[in-house]
Image (tube, rainbow, N blue to C red):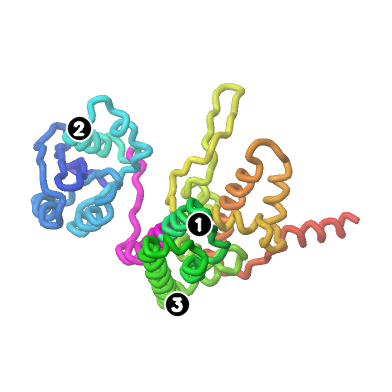
Amino acid sequence: MEDHSTIIGLDLGDRYSNYCVLNGDGEIVEEVRIRTTVQGISKAFSRYQCARIAMEVGTHSPWVSRLVSGMGHEVLVANARKVRLICQSDKKNDSLDAQTLARLARVDWRLLAPIEHRGEQAQLDLAVIRVRDAVVASRTKLINHVRGMVKSFGGRISKCSAEAFCSRALEEMPGELRETLWPVVKTIGDLSRQIRGYDRQIEAMAEQRYPEARVLTQISGVGLLTALAYMLVLEDPHRFKKSRSVGAYLGLRPRMNQSGQRDRQLRITKAGDELLRRFLVGSGQYILGPFGPDCDLRRWGLALAARGGKNAKKRAVVAVARKLSVLLHRLWVTGEVYESFRVARHEVLMGNLNG
């Protein structure tokens, strides 16, 4: 990165933001409070030319970083997990946060562990998947509410799919609850129709803009929704030099606590995108579940779970999700045909050669 005579630290707030301007000698030139709007940001930073602007990742950082970058400035979006000077400061306020960001950007921009926001189109497409997920969660909560209410009156709604729940619930709920629960059941039906609409939108999106997503669905347990979410979260597969780096990026790598002769592995970092991590864990549960087809990944995961110990099955599911994230990246980069028994065939071949 090139040197800049003007360094700016921007602390983004929901309604108002603060920024601190440093000169080349690290002296504060000015500290300003502005509105967090397109007009406010544009007016504030149009006064400077080719400045280095550091901001912390947050709700507003995607659109602000795109706007400011389009004005010719160098933008650094700080990883909030890495910048402990801000989140753990005992003198935390917006003005000091902006000043800290500016000084870190001036001394060594690597201290910010900057991240790169996805493009606007990818963010729009990913929003469809996130909204669908929110609607599914709302439907699940309402279904559980209806089931619980019916149970409290001595009834029970038999097991069925979410799509069939409305008709089943109306048939099996006690008569005295029908008037009270009918609006809720109707809302569940409306949510199901919305989800089907989002599914059609996702299908069309994959066909028109992301046809390579079909390559990722070669793996049993990885549907189009998971494949598309994977591609949109990562956006550019070539940003990772090694496929193995993807697992850590998505927060599926165990934390480490190494000191002297002790090298403990703790729970996973959960540093990446929560939605995609949940999708991958769901795929891992399917692969290791009763309906998962036999393949290298399933055999490896079951062998890991068979080692026993506390929470062995849960750890195996997470390990399969991590391995799956690496495999998906490899398929995305190469576009090759997935071999579900590649390891098994290699072992048989080596056994024949040694025999």
Q: Three-letter amino acid code at disc 2? A: Asn
14, 112: nearer the viewer:
14
Residue 23, quarter of the rendered image: top left
Across and down, in percent, residue 289 comes to: 66, 56
Residue where numbered disc 2 is placed = 93
Q: Check the image and report above or below for 269 versus 128.
A: above
| Image marks 2 and 3: residues in contact by CB distance under 8 Å | no
Residue where numbered disc 3 is placed = 207
Picture residue at 11% right of the left edge, 46% below the top: 34
Q: Which stretch is magenta?
A: 112-138
- The crowding category of the residue bearing disc 1, from other C-alpha atoms within 10 Å (few below 14, some 14 to 19, many at least 20), is some
Alpha-carbon span between mark 1 and mark 3: 21 Å
Across and down, in percent, residue 212 comes to: 49, 71
Q: Three-letter amino acid code at disc 1? A: Phe
* SS category of the residue bearing label 3: helix
Residue 176, quarter of the rendered image: bottom left
- State whether residue 295 appears in this view: yes
340, 182: nearer the viewer:
182
Picture residue at 34% right of the left edge, 40% below the top: 80
Quadrant location, the C terminus = bottom right
Q: Earlier in the sequence, mark 1 or mark 3?
A: 3
Picture residue at 14% right of the left edge, 54% below the top: 37
Residue where numbered disc 1 is placed = 279
266, 314: nearer the viewer:
314
